[in-house]
Amino acid sequence: MSRAKARDIRIVLVTCPTLAMARKIARVVVSKRLAACVNVVRGQVESFYTWKGKLEGGREHLLIMKTTSKRLSELEREVKALHSYDVPEFLVIPAVAGSKEYVQWLSGATARPLSEKIIRGAT
């Protein structure tokens, strides 16, 4: 495995209108290795925003996803495909530091399985 660096780690914030949707997105992106870990904040956050020129508000569930810069594009596509919002939140924060062990685990947990690498390389 290549040497994982904290600077390659990304934290992604996504909000969802329901806990069921938040859990579904979390399970799918982790099972597809697009994120190593997703925290689902079960307590609702209250959001205020403008949409189509109007002040809106609502209660949402926050997802905190941990991934790598290499998996960001695929993660964003998957979130958009699973999400009910026209424009779901997908905000990326770079990590500035992290424990060596956690960074290595995260990198390994988001690496493509060997079989997928072979299949992609053959096409």
Image (spheres, rainbow, N blue to C red):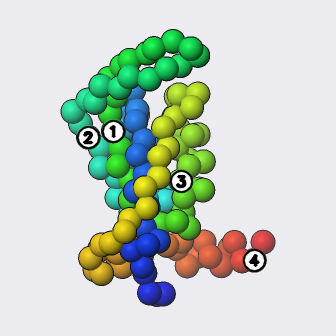
Residue at 40% x, 46% y: name it.
13
- Cα gap from disc 1 to disc 4, whole angstroms: 38 Å
User: Does dot 4 land on a helix, a strand or a loop?
Assistant: helix
Answer left or right for 57 relative to 1: left
Residue 6: tell me if it is visible.
yes
Q: Which residue is mark 2?
A: 41
- Cα gap from disc 2 to disc 3, whole angstroms: 19 Å
**Which residue is nearer to you in this view: 13 or 32?**
13
**Which residue is nearer to you in this view: 20 or 64?**
64
- Look at label 1 and name its amino acid: Leu
Q: Which numbered circle lies on residue 62?
A: 1
Q: Which numbered circle lies on residue 75?
A: 3
- Look at label 2 and name its amino acid: Val
Q: Position of residue 93 (x, y in %)?
A: 43, 55
Do residues under tags 1 and 2 come within 8 Å of each other at their CB atoms?
yes
- Cα gap from disc 1 to disc 3, whole angstroms: 16 Å
Q: Which residue is mark 4?
A: 122
- Cα gap from disc 3 to disc 4, whole angstroms: 23 Å
Residue at 49% x, 20% y: name it.
50
